[in-house]
Amino acid sequence: MYIKVRAHPGSKRESVEQKGETQFEIWVKEKAERNMANRRICQIVAEKLGVLPRDVRIISGHQSPSKMLSVEK
């Protein structure tokens, strides 16, 4: 399954807004440095979908706010 994510790293609050069945907008407190925000985004998506964090990986958009994630179920 593929998930589209719009990321907002370095926010004061952490929240998730589901825009569609496979689209999320995610605000995380972690900075966009040393892959910290990307790891937290994968953890949040895994929690939301009920899978393990290792089953979520970023396919494209590692350095972009718009990301495409792959989720193995």
Image (cartoon, rainbow, N blue to C red):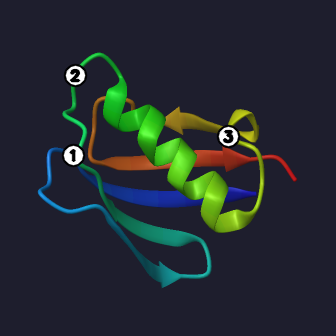
- Identified by mark 2, the residue type is Glu
| Kind of element beneath mark 2 | loop
Residue at the spot of label 2: 33
Residue at the spot of label 1: 9
Residue 10: in sight, yes or no? yes
Q: Is residue 39 left or right of residue 70?
A: left
Q: Earlier in the sequence, mark 3 or mark 1?
A: 1
What is the C-alpha distance between the residues marked 2 and 1?
9 Å
Q: Is residue 42 above or below residue 73?
A: above
Residue at the spot of label 3: 53
Residue 32 place in picture, x, y as percent: 22, 31
| Contact (Cβ within 8 Å) of mark 2 with mark 1 | no
Q: Is residue 28 left or right of residue 52?
A: left
Residue lying at 47% horizontally and 79% vertically, measured from the top left: 18
What is the C-alpha distance between the residues marked 3 and 1?
19 Å
The residue carrying pointer 2 sits among few (fewer than 14), some (14 to 19) or many (20 or more) residues within 10 Å by Cα, namely: few
| Kind of element beneath mark 3 | helix
What is the C-alpha distance between the residues marked 2 and 3?
19 Å
Q: Earlier in the sequence, mark 2 or mark 3?
A: 2
| Contact (Cβ within 8 Å) of mark 3 with mark 1 | no
Q: Earlier in the sequence, mark 2 or mark 1?
A: 1
Quarter-of-image position of residue 56: top right
Quarter-of-image position of residue 13: bottom left
